[in-house]
Image (tube, grey):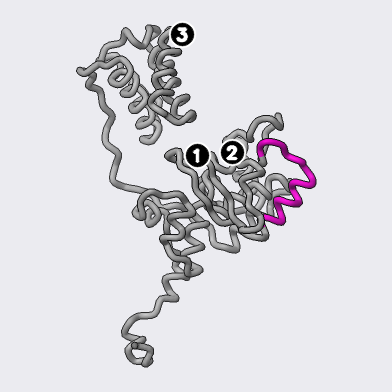
Amino acid sequence: MASHYQKTFTNYLYLQRVAPSTMEAYLRCVREVSSFHNQSADTLDNDQIQDYLLYCIQEKKLAWSSCNVLFSGLKKYYQGYLGRNNSKFSIPPRTRGKKLPMLLSQPEVLQLLEAPASLKHRALLATVYSSGLRVSEVVKIRPEHIESDNLRLKVEQGKGRKDRYTIMSSVCLETLREYWRAYQPGEWLFFGKDKSLPMPINTAQRIFYNAKKKARIEKGRGIHTLRHCFASHLLENGTEIYAIKKWMGHSSIKTTYGYIQLSADYLSKTQSPLDRLYSGETS
């Protein structure tokens, strides 16, 4: 894509209030389809666009979620930005099957949180689990987001550009205080190699995988596992699901239910209503 189109498409996305991470993904999609055909993206026809989508699905074997981002980016460019009303290209619908999150037990989470030798890494993982954060949220925490007196954390511009408050444990707060004294972070609580920049998301993911390996835990697909565990363990401990919904920043309660995978131990503790009838516990 020519630099002129890249600049003007970027301005279009700004006006559409597209999130920065989504904007970069959409720009990358257009650059890649242009590179694939060695032709300016605005000159490609529908057949060429569909050929590239098929290449990504059949040859590159992209996951459905990656294909969906690609499709959304190209649709935004061709139908939204260029205004092509006759743009007709598609990807296969997502299969109905959905894998449940691979949850860790509470003892396993403790084992993982204590595995890193680095205080910085322990503090990062503890904050994700303590407050149920997305990885994109934990790396953007600023010191002023922590409200020590109330034991809560402000999440600014989370998913859907929404602000929210979530809980923070006293144990996590003490860990962060120890971390603060040792590292003296600046604008960003968890910084990268340059203190003026937040930690990259892939660095945070690598910290999780290294801790999981050191703790010899095989379950868990990524640092997002700790967010799943936050919700599930709160439910197991008797927390109302509507409170969990608020802390996790979900717009719909259905999304919160989708995050919850009850453990067999928790389910086995539920008493049958027949037993309650004979125990005299009915009101």
Q: Is residue 141 left or right of residue 230?
A: right
Residue 70, label in figure: none
Q: Amino acid at mark 3?
A: Ser
Circle 3 packing at 10 Å, graded few (<14), some (14-19), many (20+), is few
Q: Quadrant of the N terminus?
A: top left
Q: Position of residue 31 (x, y in %)?
A: 43, 16
Tag 1 secondary structure: loop
What segment is highlighted magenta in the picture? 172-188
**Magenta includes 100?**
no
Q: Which residue is mark 3?
A: 3
Q: Earlier in the sequence, mark 2 or mark 3?
A: 3
**CB atoms of marks 3 and 1 within 8 Å:** no
- Does 195 sit above or below residue 122? above
The residue depicted at 31 percent of the width and 23 percent of the height is 75
State which quadrant residue 39 falls in.
Answer: top left
Q: Amino acid at mark 2?
A: Lys
Which of the pair 83/218 is nearer the observer? 83
Circle 2 packing at 10 Å, graded few (<14), some (14-19), many (20+), is many
Q: Is residue 101 left or right of residue 42?
A: right
Q: Which residue is mark 2?
A: 140
Q: Position of residue 173 (x, y in %)?
A: 68, 55
Tag 2 secondary structure: loop
Q: Amino acid at mark 1?
A: Gln
Q: Which residue is mark 1?
A: 157
Q: Quadrant of the C terminus?
A: bottom left
Q: CA distance from mark 3 to mark 1?
A: 30 Å
